Amino acid sequence: MHTKRSDKRFALTSPEVNRVLGAAIQQATGARVDLDRAAVTVAVDILPGRAFFSVEKVPGAGGLPVGTSGRVLALLSGGIDSPVAAWRMMRRGCRVDFVHFHSVPFLDRTSQEKARELVRLLVGWELEADLHLVPFAEVQRQIVAGVGRPLRVVLYRRMMLRIAEAIARRAGAEALVTGESLGRWPRRRSPTWR
């Protein structure tokens, strides 16, 4: 038994909880008690109004448990910044789903395959996630036909955010996540000493 008592108002101390639950488990199973080489350790976390029990520790990304900070939708571009942003949100306790915009048939399916692979790698930290693959070629075609070059990328992003927002609302996500601020930090120059 290993008890953590975050709620100090709980009537029993952590050692008392260990004794009471340990005795109940021993009585129910008839198992021999060996505190030095325990076959199973039961962990108990006592919080206000609830208690959590576990018999297995699964490695995670660190930070807060996934799902404790709500659900978000990450725009996954295929570069490094967006999966890093998604992973950092997982560490903050968010359950992360993904959306990827592709340009099939103008481009091949490489970006979709890369998005699937990134999600496969990231889902190991949260056990499940939804990946929404959104065909974006027609939107791009219409923007190219009606807008001059300098504004196209701005409109692409604006449309992606509008579509992602609609998907997020349907999925119950509370925020959109992008890797843009991660990749756009100004590079600091080394000071020149004279």
Image (cartoon, rainbow, N blue to C red):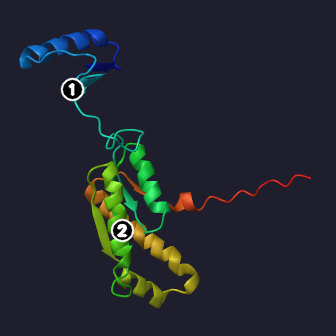
Say which element carries label 2. Answer: helix
**Nearest to the observer: residue 188 or residue 23:** 23
Task: Classify 10 Å Cα crowding around label 1: few (below 14), some (14-19), many (20 and above).
Answer: few
- Residue furthest out toward the right: 194
The mark closer to the camera, 1 or 2, is 1
Residue 15, placed above or below residue 6: above
Expressed as whole percent of the image width and height from the top left, the position of residue 147 reads 51, 86
Residue 110, placed above or below residue 27: below
**Nearest to the observer: residue 38 or residue 191:** 38
**Nearest to the observer: residue 32 or residue 43:** 32
**Which numbered disc, 1 or 2, marks the residue that appears first in the sequence?**
1
The residue that label 1 is drawn on is 40
Expressed as whole percent of the image width and height from the top left, the position of residue 108 reads 36, 84
Question: Which amino acid, mark 2?
Answer: Ala
Q: Is residue 12 visible?
A: no
Q: Is residue 4 visible?
A: yes
Q: Residue at x 8, y 20 (%)?
A: 29
Where residue 186 sits, quadrant-wise, is bottom right
- CA gap between label 1 and label 2 equals 39 Å
The residue that label 2 is drawn on is 115
Expressed as whole percent of the image width and height from the top left, the position of residue 48 reads 30, 22
Say which element carries label 1. Answer: loop
Where residue 64 sits, quadrant-wise, is top left
Expressed as whole percent of the image width and height from the top left, the position of residue 73 reads 36, 57
Q: Residue at x 23, y 22 (%)?
A: 38
Residue 103, placed above or below residue 77: below
**Nearest to the observer: residue 56 or residue 7:** 56
Residue 191, placed above or below residue 18: below
Task: Classify 10 Å Cα crowding around label 2: few (below 14), some (14-19), many (20 and above).
Answer: many
Q: Are marks 1 and 2 in contact (CB under 8 Å)?
A: no
Question: Which amino acid, mark 1?
Answer: Val
